[in-house]
Structures are given as C-alpha cells and as structure tokens.
Amino acid sequence: MQNKDNNKTYCIIGDPIQHSLSPAMQNAAFNKLGLNSSYIAFRVKKDELKESIESLRAIGVSGFNITVPHKVEAMKYLDELDISARRANAVNTVHNVGGVLKAYNTDIYGFIHPLHLRKINFDGMRVLLIGAGGAARAALAALADEDGISEVNIANRSEGNARLLLEVSVPFGLNCKIVPWEKIPIFSKTAELIVNATTLGMNSEPSVVDHQNVKKHAIVYDIVYKPVHTALLENAKQAGAEVIYGYEMLLYQGARSFEIWTGMSAPIDGMKKALLGTVGEVC
C-alpha cells in the first residue's frame, strides 16, 4: 500500500497526448484519498519510445499509463508482463517496483465493465469491431470471456494490422473474421454490438456508420472519450440503439490502474466527477 507521506509521480505517454483526461482523473483520485502524488502527461513520439521508457525508469517514476500509438510496441521495453498484458498482447499500465517495470492491461476490465453494469446478454451476439490496435486487442480479450458470442467481424483500414489482430485472437476461441473497411455499413446492419476501437471521432470526423445502418436496440460502444458525443454515438441514438460512452472505459481502466499502483480502492465517484467536469455532462 502506498505511504501517504511519500511523494510519488505517475504519468501517461502517447502521441497525441494533449487530449488526455487521465491527469485530471488520477489527480482527483490522489487528492480524494490525501495521497502526496501527482500525475502528468508526456508526448512521446514513436521513435522516442524506448529512450522515454528508460528515462522514466531512471528517474524513478512510480508508474505510468501508455496510450495510442504505443500499446503494442511498448511491450518490447518492459521487464514483466502480467497475465492481462500477455492475454491482450498489448499494455496500457506499468508499475515500477524497485526499478522493475511490470506491465498490465487494464483496458480489458475497462472495456467490459460498462457492459457488465448494463447486464448485457452476449448469447448469439454478432459483433462488429472497428480497429485493430491495442484497444481492439483488449476488447477481443474481454469478449472472449463471455459465453455465447456468435461472431466477431473485424474491420480496419490496414488489412495487414487486421490480420495481426486475427492471429493474436486465435487463442481466444472466438469466431473472428476480417471484413473490408468499405463494407462496414453492411455488417453494422446486423451487429448487436458495434465497437469503435479507433481514434476516429476524436477530431469530430464523420462516423463510418450511419444511423440507417444500426439496428434498433443494438449496443454501440465508442472508445473515443473526447468529444463525449461523437458522431457515431449520435447516429446510434438516432437509430434507437443503446450507447456506451468512451469516458466509461477510461474511468474503469484508470480505476484499475490506480489500484495496481497504490494498493487502495479507487475513489470511483471522485474520478468520474473529474472526468465529467472536463468532457461535459452526458445527456
């Protein structure tokens, strides 16, 4: 358990990073529990990743989060992989234990918990997963623990990355296949769960799924959390679908990271309040 008198520093690395709400969320958690800790954001470019991780080790940072585009590549430069990181073949949380960098994937829990809170029935579910990066890997790892999923259709701009995702998903036992990016509207029409695991929408881009191509009562899950009301989620609401906001995954993965670092229960309400105060109230 973290000693309240010890000053500890945590951070998040990624590129881009200016949009990150993790500092607001984690600093709110530290303040809520009276911990003498701080959390900051660092922009780390792809060609700076190895050097940056070694620098964080050298200065004794207590822990850090990893976001786009480093969740897969970072595994090369860390010392130990928790079972969650090995399962997802991607990492987003690192704990520095005496100079040993141990990596976890809290995105798995962060992704699935909002679905569990809604008591979703996965039996016979057809899934459309958009994206093939670290978040998509975590989503597949999470869905693999649910019984009854009928099929998972994976669409990604780069077919090569989609095939890599298909390869790492083999041990999950899910019925996965790659579908062409341009055929997303066809597969979205029959999907009971649509997941956007890309950054599309972060810069207010149009949705790749129109409201006419979403089933009524389907579930549409967008991992983009800023803006909170993405075009995809607006289209989903227009279609009469249930939506899951990106801030929800951010909240629960962040809470699990906090617990790994501190050994304390995360103050969920305070963290959620900090997030919603930043992104705006959800209607």
Image (spheres, grey):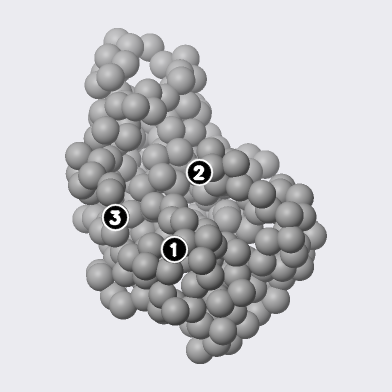
* Amino acid bearing label 3: Val
* Amino acid bearing label 2: Pro
Distance from disc 1 to disc 2, alpha carbons, whole Å, reads: 19 Å
Residue drawn where x is 53% and y is 38% of the image? 117
Q: State whether residue 277 is above or below residue 42.
A: above
Left or right: where 98 falls relative to 267: right
Whole-percent x, y for residue 239 in the image: 43, 69
Whole-percent x, y for residue 92 in the image: 48, 48
In the picture of the structure, the residue carrying the numbered disc 3 is 228
Which element is circle 3 on? loop
In the picture of the structure, the residue carrying the numbered disc 1 is 240
- The mark found on residue 114 in the picture is 2
Whole-percent x, y for residue 269 in the image: 34, 27
Which element is circle 1 on? loop
Left or right: where 25 falls relative to 141: left
Residue drawn where x is 31% and y is 42% of the image? 22
* N-terminal-most mark, 1 or 2: 2
Residue drawn where x is 41% and y is 75% of the image? 211
Distance from disc 3 to disc 2, alpha carbons, whole Å, reads: 15 Å
